């Protein structure tokens, strides 16, 4: 018998690697077969376009048939792209399909804007501010209470009032002003934010390595979250779009050239659009210094970072210059308003302990202290361990909001495209040579334990502050002694209130159902200030003559807040008796 010899197959030739701005990320051959993960990424981006598309079509088919027809064509594009993504055999062909997915996504975003451009409280304020800017009137510090109500949300403050003023840096209103002619209401502001989202998506798509481009489509417009915020006119969308060129390949920053000028100018413009970039900037600057010091030395790194900060600050100042000159005090208080307005506690973070799981706290201000301490601690850890934490520079800043008095998820998700951009173009390999300060206690034979101790020590103050806030006791004990009601609404309640603490409090009352609260109730009778260790009787009236009773089983809470000191007291109401 003859033994058959099996000839080994020739080794497959490896395609050359494609380098991202931050380092090697993938291997591809533009004329060969695409990687399977590239197909999957394109397919996921394509599938994500189904999210929210049917409601858009259903809304359009009733009175905007042209939009409905375009949405139907987008369905055809999604289906055809899904088939082709799985069957094409060349990387170049799959790259073209990435472009088709992007164009389809942008088309759906535009259709969504055509159908829904009414905006929100933020777009209403931006539009009003743009009108005042064009008229040469004061913009900051001016209340516009008539803009709110009728479906436009209000920001309640702990002193029993509402914030009716514009509280953002001026870039969004300046871009809105030339577009006020395009439509009524908030159409101009929503067009600016939606246009910024599209521009940011295209920029991110274009600057990412070719196989990763559908990640830009997926993160920016695919899930439907950011387009919704853009249609509401959030200035943070504009800020995020301006941060895209800053974050893509940010480990290269400080090397000189036009790229640094563009990144610095975009960072300055982003800080002039909304306050969230203020929290990201220190992490990026610390990372750039560490990277350049590892390459060039301390002096050259300081010069590079100083030059970058100078361009960014100049850009920021130029955008703000008109307001700095015309209304310096109101401008400064206006752009700092989110940090100083004492808005009511709200969000999905740690503050929920005091809002929903206990009856309140007399130490709410410690949530704000915990947020600042956590931001400082994370920045210190980032500097100490930049080689490990460098890739997370675009995520770490938002962790501080989780323990803040206002911890809305919008603070996180509005910046998620930057997470994706950094994950692709700032991998851990980019930070291998970054400079890390190494105090003596971190260099000894027990350096592992010392590093753990450093982490604990830097995060412990924030944890302690959050613990103080969460374990506080409600300063007011409240008991509803009488409820005035109709078949479907409360028309007034009488509350006996006892101040359990030593501090004098000026309580302001509201009713909450779930996470939503009614406007503040009017105090028909009762002391405006309740002295420590004293009691009072309050007659409360709903602001619009009646408070609609929710369905049976919904939790209704009477809440009392005060601003100085910042406190919250709550008690559940039993409204089941005699309910129809």
Image (spheres, rainbow, N blue to C red):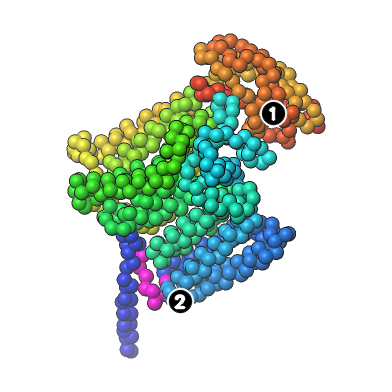
Disc assigned to residue 398: none
Q: Among all residues in the image, which is located at the extreme top?
A: 534
Labels 1 and 2: the sequence-earlier one: 2
Image coords of residue 198 (percent x, y): 51, 58
Quarter in which the C terminus is drawn: top right
- Magenta includes 29? yes
Q: Is residue 167 left or right of residue 481?
A: left
**What residue does disc 2 label?**
89
For residue 118, side relative to residue 272 (left or right)? right
Say which quarter of the image contains residue 204: bottom left
How would you rate the neighbour count of disc 2 (Cα within 10 Å): few for under 14, some for 14-19, many for 20 or more? some
Other residues around mark 1 within 10 Å, as few (<14) / some (14–19) / many (≥20): some
Where does the image place residue 90, in percent across and percent down from the top left? 43, 76
Residue at image coords 78%, 30%: 579
**Residues in magenta, as a range:** 26-34
Q: Is residue 313 magenta?
A: no
Quarter placement of the N terminus? bottom left
Instruction: Report how far apart the C-alphas of labels 1 and 2 lie in the structure.
Output: 66 Å
């Amino acid at each position: 018998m003859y033994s058959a010899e099996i000839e080994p197959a020739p080794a497959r030739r490896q395609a050359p690697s494609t380098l991202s701005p931050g380092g090697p990320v993938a291997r591809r051959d533009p004329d060969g077969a695409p990687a399977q993960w590239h197909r999957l990424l394109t397919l996921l981006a394509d599938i994500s376009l189904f999210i929210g598309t049917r409601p858009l079509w259903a809304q359009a088919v009733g009175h905007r048939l042209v939009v409905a027809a375009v949405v139907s064509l987008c369905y055809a594009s999604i289906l055809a792209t899904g088939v082709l993504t799985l069957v094409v055999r060349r990387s170049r062909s799959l790259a073209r399909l990435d472009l088709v997915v992007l164009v389809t996504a942008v088309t759906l975003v535009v259709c969504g804007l055509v159908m829904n451009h009414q905006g929100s409280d933020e777009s209403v304020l931006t539009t009003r501010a743009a009108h005042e800017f064009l008229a040469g009137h004061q913009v900051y510090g001016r209340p516009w209470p008539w803009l709110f109500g009728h479906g436009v949300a209000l920001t309640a403050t702990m002193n029993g009032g509402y914030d009716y003023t514009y509280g953002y840096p001026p870039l969004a209103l300046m871009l809105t002003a030339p577009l006020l002619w395009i439509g009524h209401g908030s159409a101009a502001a929503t067009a600016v934010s939606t246009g910024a989202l599209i521009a940011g998506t295209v920029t991110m798509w274009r600057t990412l390595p070719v196989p990763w481009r559908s990640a830009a489509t997926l993160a920016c417009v695919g899930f439907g979250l950011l387009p919704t915020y853009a249609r509401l006119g959030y200035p943070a969308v504009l800020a995020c779009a301006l941060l895209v060129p800053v974050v893509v390949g940010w480990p290269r920053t400080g090397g000189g050239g036009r790229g640094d000028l563009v990144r610095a100018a975009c960072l300055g413009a982003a800080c002039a659009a909304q306050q969230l970039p203020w929290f990201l900037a220190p992490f990026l600057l610390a990372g750039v210094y560490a990277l350049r010091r590892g390459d060039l030395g301390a002096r050259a790194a300081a010069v590079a970072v100083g030059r970058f900060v100078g361009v960014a600050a100049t850009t920021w100042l130029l955008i703000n210059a008109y307001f700095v000159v015309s209304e310096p005090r109101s401008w400064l208080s206006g752009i700092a308003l989110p940090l100083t307005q004492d808005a009511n506690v709200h969000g999905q973070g740690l503050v929920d302990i005091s809002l929903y799981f206990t009856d309140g706290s007399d130490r709410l201000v410690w949530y704000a202290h915990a947020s600042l301490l956590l931001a400082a601690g994370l920045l210190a850890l980032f500097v100490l361990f930049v080689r490990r934490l460098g890739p997370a520079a675009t995520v770490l800043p938002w962790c501080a909001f989780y323990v803040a008095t206002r911890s809305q998820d919008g603070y996180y998700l509005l910046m998620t495209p930057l997470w994706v951009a950094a994950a692709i173009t700032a991998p851990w390999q980019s930070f291998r040579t970054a400079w890390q300060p190494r105090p003596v206690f971190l260099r000894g034979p027990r350096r592992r334990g010392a590093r753990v101790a450093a982490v604990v020590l830097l995060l412990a103050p924030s944890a302690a502050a959050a613990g103080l806030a969460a374990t506080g006791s409600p300063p007011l004990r409240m008991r509803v002694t009488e409820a005035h009601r109709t078949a479907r609404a409360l028309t007034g309640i009488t509350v006996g209130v006892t101040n359990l603490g030593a501090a004098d409090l000026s309580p302001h009352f509201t009713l909450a159902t779930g996470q939503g609260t009614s406007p503040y109730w009017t105090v028909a009778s009762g002391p405006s200030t309740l002295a420590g260790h004293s009691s009072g009787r309050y007659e409360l009236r709903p602001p619009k003559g009646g408070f609609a009773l929710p369905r049976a089983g919904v939790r209704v809470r009477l809440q009392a807040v005060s601003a100085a000191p910042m406190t919250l007291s709550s008690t559940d109401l039993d409204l089941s008796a005699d309910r129809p």
